[in-house]
Amino acid sequence: MEKRVYLDWNATTPLRREVREAMAAAWNAGGNPSSVHAEGRRARGLVEDARAVVAAAIGGESRNVIFTSGGTEANALALAPGTLSRSGQTIERLVVSAVEHASVLAGGRFMPDRTAILPVHRSGLVNLEALRAMLANEPPALVSVMLANNETGAIQPIAAIADLVHVAGGLLHVDAVQAFGKIDFTIKGLSADLVSVSAHKIGGPTGIGALILAADLTSPAALIRGGGQERGRRAGTENVPAIAGFGAAVTAAIAARDEDMPRVEALRNRLEQGLRQTQGNAGRGVIFSAEVARLPNTTLFGVPGLKAETAIIGFDLEGIAVSSGSACSSGKIQPSHVLEAMGYGPDIAKSAIRFSLGWETTEEDVDRALKAWRKLAGALLRGHETVLERF
Ligand code: PLP
């Protein structure tokens, strides 16, 4: 049987060898980081080493890294009303971009009537004029805009957004779950106040992530209270093996990034060239957000009339794992809320297929995906010629 081709790295990534080793060592070491004996101190050492690695990776400070159960919890913790602005005012208003991950769109503990949705342009980038208007003559807001979108890969102009937010006295949370390890950034460079990251997008385990605070920011109120771990900001005995694995993943991802990402980008470009050239679809298919800076590994591709659900099953039968931009937990494909926010109609929004590549992706993998697409496209698009002509 031919080897499977995994092109769904934005969903999750394979565990890196170094991560497996670090996690096995942590499991074998045992100990509770809160215990004072040697076993406890050893576990504490593993947690603090990983914390320092995560902090250094984005130019933050160790004491400002709060380990969480993943990106979702980091986002929820960031969006805790009652967070203090730098002037000491309590922030009671939330503004989130329309293309955020569901965990941000959910709004944390903000009430829906205190949450406003920031529109985006057709490119997927946030509308800065709209943001300016939303912030004017209003109490300070907590604004949440992701660094890179999980569906399109579009990279937001975070520094410009931060300027507007800070001038208005607010705070900026950046969900950097997809950007972390793929592009180089620092919390200072972004001028962000809170940044969310997650381990399983960079070769670490699922179920571990972190919220990192800017140096001078008061912590948001804890979501989980109890034993005082994480300086009282997130209670519960630390998941030491996962945290050690997270640290190992960050070290490996950053060390390999400058070599891996240009190679991944070249493969992604090869894929896009192939998609654009495919048979009768030339010029009709769309690569979303292609006109703006994107992550080097992501392609969101759609053709009006195509049903992503059917296409994904077709790819799967050909041995290729791809996804739609947005599968809900039942696995049923909804029209992408990201594409809808970008102004695309349901017909094309339902057609979007996401190819996301990673450090183990090869040229052969890309060529197999293209071969499968050429085989599938004819059958999947038959009967949609009129739609195609109109597009
Ligand atoms: N934010 C973004 C942009 C994501 O892509 C994801 C994961 O898909 C998350 C947050 C949630 O992260 P986690 O799976 O660690 O909860």
Image (cartoon, rainbow, N blue to C red):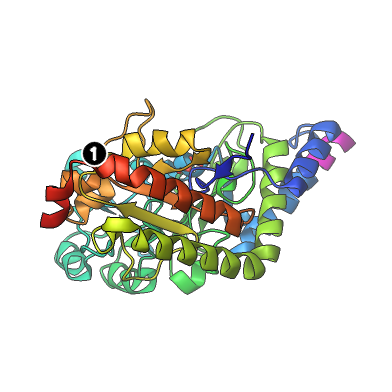
Residue 238 to residue 297: above or below? above
Residue 147, visible in the rendered structure: no
Quadrant where the C terminus sits is: bottom left
Kind of residue at badge 1: Met
Q: Nearer the viewer, residue 377 or 133?
A: 377
The outermost residue toward the top is 330
In the image, farthest residue toward the right: 38
Position of 46 relative to 1 (above/below): below
Q: Is residue 286 left or right of residue 257?
A: left
Secondary structure mostly taken by the magenta-highlighted segment of the chain: helix
Q: Quadrant of the N terminus?
A: top right
Q: Is residue 40 magenta?
A: yes
Residue 97 pos. (x, y %) = 27, 55
Q: Which residues are magenta?
A: 37-43
Residue at left offset 55%, top offset 69%: 184
Direction from residue 315 to residue 360 in the image, left or right: right
Q: Which of the 4 quarters of the picture holds residue 23?
A: top right
Q: Secondary structure at mark 1?
A: loop
Q: Which residue is mark 1?
A: 111
Nearer the observer, 113 or 138: 113
The answer to whether one can see residue 1 in this image is yes
Residue 33: in magenta span: no
Kindly identify the residue that appears in the image at 53 percent across and 55 percent down.
366
Residue 183, position as x, y percentages in the image: 53, 66
Who's the residue at 61% across and 31% down the image? Answer: 236
- Give the image location of residue 44, x and y in percent: 77, 43
* Direction from residue 54 to residue 354 in the image, left or right: left
